[in-house]
Amino acid sequence: QAAAFHSQHGPMLDLRAVVQSRAPAMCLAAEFKRASPSKGLINPGATAAAQAAAYGAAGASVISVLTEERWFQGSLADLRAARLATTGQAYRRPAILRKEFVFGTYQIYEAAAHGADTILLIVAVTPADLLKVLVDTCREVGMEPLVEVHGQSELDVALNAGARVIGVNNRNLHTFRMDLATTDRTAEELAKRGIRFDHRLCSQGGDGAATAATMAMPEYALCSLSGMSSPTDVDRYRQIGVGMCLIGESLMRAADPAAAIAGLCLDPAAYGRRMMDAAAAGGAYTAGTKIVKVCGITTAEDALVACRAHANLIGVIFAPKSKRCVTAEQASDVVRAVRDFGERSGRIGLACPGNNVAKMAPVQALVIKARALEEAARRPLVVGVFQNQPAEFIREMVDTCGLDMVQLHGQEGMEAASEDICGVPALRVVDIETSTDGSSSRAVASTDAVQKILDGVTSDPAAILLDTSIKGSKEGGGTGVTFDHSIAEQLQNRGLPVIIAGGLKPGNVKDAVMKTRPWGIDVSSGVEQSPGKKNHDAVTKFVGGARDAAIEASKGF
């Protein structure tokens, strides 16, 4: 059956040749899966043929197809459909990878008969002697397998079995913790052993169908198989010689997979242009709403609801006068829950590669930081909110609780929002004075407030958050009142992306996002059933409404 299939539809592609022929670009393995054990349903209605065709047309070099039925809702029919949908097209055919728990040689023959070019072999679940048999069987049928490792001991087993394409699972299969540095450590270990794998050494050329094109290539290829979702992740691995990144969940959730793939900047030149564009700041900010923050979280349960709704930032308040003030223990519980959800074990920082933001003009620096925060917050981050509290206390809570960021909501000043002072990146709140009925003197407030903010902003914060301040009140925030959003609009027209807060709720968030198109939005009391206790349905509707409105508002831009 395998011979008949490949005779009719074309020969198998050599995985190592496919990966290396894409240099200097990163090879992308785009994954098709409807669900996963850790995230549940992802895109249950997706079809393999349509998704594979979209991936192939967008430039994916490998298409990974989950064929496991129980946890991933896949099948061998999906494998065949993906292969047929990407054969005979105008673009270069991607290699088709069967991703499955493989325990016997029959599954290799089965994969070949359904159109696979390669198959995943997982060291963690395969005895060493069997792994050697499976690798040899793959080569007998014309496949170069992808051998997955996690840690040095598994790397030893893979190399002893003859693996040439080594994939690193950044997720520990025993704890399900994600650590992107796992790939870095594997690259270091291979280099120490004198094993040639560096993708940057590969010359252009070859279509993966013959070995002649690989003669000058490194004998091995290194791939990273989990945890990546952004161009920053891709560039991180490009710098250490990784040749392929496998990305699944974020592409399966993307409304436009082609745009999502283009946004990964697989080609280093594309990544360079992206960073130059970001650094060019000065034009109006028109990219729309990217960040959604749910603040006033007091429990791990509420935090997880916000995470599942796809909020980027989870706010915990340490200001003692707030009805939503948390203890260090409560905040730590929230941090643990958010980290577990994001499959990470440590803090996520902001990566601003190639740019010395300290020497930039403030607005230019904040544009760079906004882009970096967008990338970091693809996994939700926990923000500790403070108000006129000592820097020593803020640092203590950052270290004790594991906060990713802080937010300064008092009279601390712009310079106090420096990462050097806070220990982590900081949002700086700017209060917009408003009457109790939500009105403000537009004629005075709008233009004057915009210029005052621009004159006072520095490059110290990670971002600026605008919130309502009631006239005559000494403390800002938590008012439940909206301010004049034209101020945010004018600031963004001057190039400064901002987050807006104050009086937002499920019923008005669509209007705010559609009309103002702020870079970020923040909600607290607008999704509560009582102070400190979130209404889970309201949280889901708010975040979902914001996301839907952002997509709608982006049309025409």
Image (tube, helix red, strand yellow):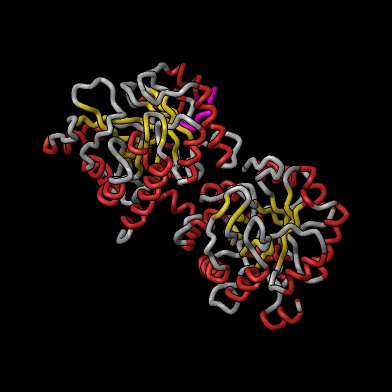
Q: Position of residue 285 (x, y in %)?
A: 31, 48
Camera-side residue of 120 and 275:
120
Relative to 525, say whether 161 is above or below. below
In this rendering, the count of numbered labels is: 0
Q: Quadrant of the N terminus?
A: bottom right
Q: Quadrant of the C terminus?
A: bottom left
Relative to 529, say whether 129 is above or below. below
**Can residue 84 be seen by looking at this rendering?**
yes
**Can residue 220 be seen by looking at this rendering?**
no
Q: Position of residue 218 (x, y in %)?
A: 72, 58
Q: Position of residue 170 (x, y in %)?
A: 65, 45
Residue 404 drawn in magenta = yes
Residue 230 drawn in magenta = no
Q: Residue at x 25, y 50 (%)?
A: 515
Q: Residue at x 69, y 69 (%)?
A: 116
Magenta stretch: give its range: 398-405
Camera-side residue of 56 and 267:
56
Say whether residue 95 is left or right of residue 315. Answer: right
Say whether residue 505 is left or right of residue 15. Answer: left
Camera-side residue of 251 and 359:
251
Check the image and name the residue furthest to the front: 529
Q: Residue at x 65, y 69 (%)?
A: 79
Camera-side residue of 278 and 288:
288
Say whether residue 98 is left or right of residue 329. Answer: right
Q: Residue at x 70, y 73 (%)?
A: 114
Q: Position of residue 109 (x, y in %)?
A: 78, 70
